[in-house]
Structure formats: C-alpha cells, structure tokens
Image: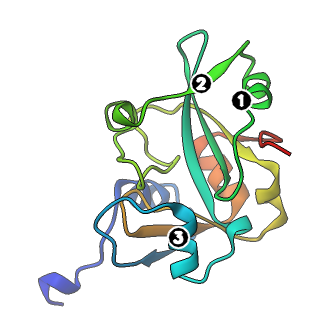
C-alpha cells in the first residue's frame, strides 16, 4: 500500500475502533469551513439524518455538547433544562479548538479533550444510522445513534426550536 493510500483515521475514529463500535466513513474534498447544509447538498445527504455538534457553556461554567440535525436550531431554554442549568449559551467559535481539540467544521462529540455531558436530539432515534463529523473537515462518520450515545455517554432529549 502506497503512503498516500494509507487509510485516514481521526482521533474520533480511533476511539470508536478502541470501543469496538461499528461505523462507516466518508471523506470529501474540502479544505475550509463550509456550512453543514451546503456539504449535505453537495453530497446529496438528507438534512434530518445529518447532525451537527454544538458546544455550550452553562451559567455554572460547565460545558455541554448538543448533537442536533443540521437544519435545526438549538433551543437554549430546552437545552439548559435538559442538562439541569438555569441558562446556557453557545461558546465563541474562537474557543472551540482549545476546549474540544477540534476546529469549526470538524467538531464531533467523539474524542473531545474532555468527556462533556452530551445530549443527542431525539430525532436521531428514528434512524438506523446518522451522519456526524469525522473529527476533521472533509470527514464524516455514519453511526448508529445508540452506539454513539454509549461511547459519549449521551442522553436523548428534545432540544431544538419547534
């Protein structure tokens, strides 16, 4: 196998392998942040099965991760309630890498610097497989929602704007 043919593995993929979690990957050409819906359009993927990872900070200064469909908006009140906070707010984009180890557009709930309390939106349970970021720009992971929840110790909750 030539060096350039070597299989690419991100930290998230190595963690899934270590935990013996079944998943598939997809790599696409992209060298900068592009909105997730544009990526889904480019790859002809359904919005409702493609999930983004959002990182928030609660009034307590604890951080929380929310995994929601790319075409939905996080309801901050519902999200705060789901993690037992009075209120939460999105972290600044400039803080994502220092906090999670991932860059914007490559942030995934698997393998962050710390295992933050994670909530996956309930619609994920409607599918045998959802699509999340693979841990870098240009990589995706296709994974069964309960397997993802087990690895990141997530719960499922209604956390989007209706």
Q: State the residue lying farthest toward the top.
A: 60
Could you tell me how far apart the alpha carbons at marks 3 and 1 are, in whole angstroms? 24 Å
Marks 3 and 1, the one that precedes in the sequence: 3
Q: Is mark 1 on a helix, strand or loop?
A: helix
The residue under label 1 is 76
**Helix, strand or loop at mark 2:** strand
Percent across and percent down for residue 139 are 41, 68
Q: Residues within 10 Å of mark 1 (few under 14, many from 20)?
A: some
Residue situated in front as seen by the camera: 137 or 161: 161
Assign a secondary structure to mark 3. helix
Q: How crowded is mark 3: few (under 14 residues within 10 Å), some or many (20 or more)?
A: few
Q: In this view, does 36 lie above or below 158?
A: below
Find the distance from the CA under tag 2 to the CA under tag 3.
25 Å
Q: In the rendered structure, which disc, 2 or 3, sits on the residue that comes first in sequence?
A: 3
User: How many numbered badges does the structure rendering display?
Assistant: 3
Q: Which residue is drawn at 49% across and 49% down?
A: 110
Which one is in front, 153 or 126? 126
* Disc 2 + disc 3, Cβ < 8 Å: no
- What residue is disc 3 on? 38
Residue at screen point 31% across, 32% down:
98
Please report contact status of discs 2 and 1: CB closer than 8 Å, yes or no: yes
């Amino acid at each position: 196998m030539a060096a350039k043919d070597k299989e690419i593995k991100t930290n998230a993929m190595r963690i899934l392998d270590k935990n013996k979690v079944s998943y598939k990957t997809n790599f696409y050409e992209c060298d900068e942040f592009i909105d997730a819906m544009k990526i889904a359009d480019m790859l002809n993927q359904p919005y409702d099965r493609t999930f983004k990872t959002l990182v928030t900070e609660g009034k307590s200064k604890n951080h929380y991760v929310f995994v929601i469909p790319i075409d939905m908006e996080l309801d901050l009140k519902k999200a705060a309630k789901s993690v037992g906070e009075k209120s939460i707010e999105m972290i600044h984009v400039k803080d994502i890498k220092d906090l999670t180890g991932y860059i914007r557009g490559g942030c995934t709930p698997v393998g962050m610097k710390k295992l933050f309390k994670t909530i996956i939106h309930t619609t994920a349970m409607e599918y045998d497989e959802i699509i999340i970021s693979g841990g870098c720009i240009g990589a995706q992971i296709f994974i069964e929602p309960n397997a993802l929840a087990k690895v990141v110790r997530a719960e499922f909750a209604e956390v989007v704007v209706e």
